[in-house]
């Protein structure tokens, strides 16, 4: 029931987002454009509205939803693997690896394309995914979550330093690199939607299928082994799939914080730790949160656009501090 209500809220948020912006479009016209068979006239006569909805706002809305889904799901899994509600999708240095790869690609003038994806997206995906693999092997093959965490922190700081060095040596690219690290959907295209949607949605469904094993792993390695779960193999599986999702999300949006931290944490408090329900609820809630954040990012100071990572941090950080104080019984 909760899942269906969240789906309804997501649909309402998506239609509302399509109506607002530098050009306000009536809700009825949005419906006619998206569902022309519902109108006797077969759509709207305003060609500009059709272009804005179908080529600009709709791919952006879908990409924000898909990215929010991916970050929330990967955050849920990371919190389960590390048995820590403070865990997030960037713990293994994924954001630092992506940022360094993007900075290096910009500095070197990387121009390659693949499946319609530009050089920046390719660099971000490869940088994030390869970094997580390096962290995994440095930690000794993920024998313990503690070694994974320490390795991720160390590699993350190292790559951040390398990115700063690249920026220092290529000052003409500083603005582009910094803007990317703030996160944005202003370059959304149907190609990005078509490439990222299968990666994120299918991988999330795969995690749902094995969510029972994740529930067992939360009880501890020894307990999970006694129940027949191959802890090391399953940990590697969850890490790889979650990292794949995160890298796919970062590649099309840049670094967006707090979605994978706050959304799973709040849902875990409200619905409990069962990942069989927590993962699908996180998918929808993450999509709602990031869509609303992006809608605010492009409308608050219209026609100027705020990087969406700033919006998620403005809302996410204070709320998370509130949760921490509440957990410590500092506030009611």
Image (tube, grey):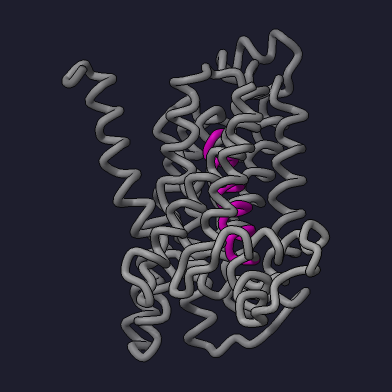
Q: Position of residue 96 (x, y in %)?
A: 45, 60
In screen coordinates, is 318 left or right of 19? left
The magenta stretch is 59-76
Quarter of the C terminus within the rendering: top left
At a point 33% along the width and 88% down the height, the residue shown is 171
Secondary structure predominantly adopted by residues drawn in magenta: helix
Q: Is residue 130 visible?
A: no
Q: How many marks?
A: 0
Which residue is nearer to you in this view: 6 or 176? 6
At a point 42% along the width and 37% down the height, the residue shown is 262
At a point 69% along the width and 63% down the height, the residue shown is 193
Which residue is nearer to you in this view: 76 or 238? 76
Residue 50: in magenta span = no
Residue 66: in magenta span = yes
Residue 134 in which image quadrant: bottom right
In screen coordinates, is 321 left or right of 185? left
């Amino acid at each position: 029931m909760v899942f269906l209500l969240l789906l309804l809220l997501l649909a309402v948020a998506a239609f509302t987002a399509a109506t607002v912006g530098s050009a306000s479009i009536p809700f009825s016209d949005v419906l006619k454009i998206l569902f022309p068979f519902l109108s006797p006239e077969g759509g709207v006569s305003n060609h500009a509205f059709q272009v804005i909805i179908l080529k600009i706002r709709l791919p952006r809305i879908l990409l924000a939803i898909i990215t929010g889904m991916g970050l929330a799901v990967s955050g849920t899994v990371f919190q389960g693997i590390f048995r820590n509600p403070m865990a997030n999708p960037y713990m293994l240095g994924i954001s630092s690896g992506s940022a360094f790869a993007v900075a290096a690609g910009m500095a070197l003038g990387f121009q390659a394309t693949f499946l319609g994806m530009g050089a920046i997206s390719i660099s971000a995906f490869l940088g994030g995914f390869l970094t997580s693999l390096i962290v995994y092997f440095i930690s000794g093959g993920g024998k313990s979550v503690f070694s994974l965490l320490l390795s991720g922190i160390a590699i993350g700081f190292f790559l951040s330093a390398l990115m700063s060095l690249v920026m220092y040596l290529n000052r003409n690219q500083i603005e582009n690199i910094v803007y990317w690290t703030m996160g944005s959907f202003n370059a959304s295209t149907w190609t990005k939607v078509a490439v990222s949607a299968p990666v994120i949605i299918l991988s999330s469904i795969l995690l749902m299928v094995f969510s029972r094993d994740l529930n067992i792993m939360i009880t501890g390695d020894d307990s999970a082994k006694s129940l027949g779960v191959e802890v090391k193999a399953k940990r590697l599986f969850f890490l790889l799939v979650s990292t794949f999702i995160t890298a796919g999300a970062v590649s099309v949006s840049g670094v967006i914080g707090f979605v994978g931290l706050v959304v799973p944490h709040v849902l875990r408090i409200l619905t409990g730790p069962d990942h069989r329900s927590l993962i699908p609820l996180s998918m929808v809630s993450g999509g709602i949160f990031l869509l609303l954040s992006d809608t605010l990012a492009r409308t608050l100071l219209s026609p100027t656009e705020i990087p969406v990572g700033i919006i998620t941090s403005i809302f996410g950080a204070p709320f998370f501090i509130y949760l921490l104080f509440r957990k410590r019984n500092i506030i009611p």
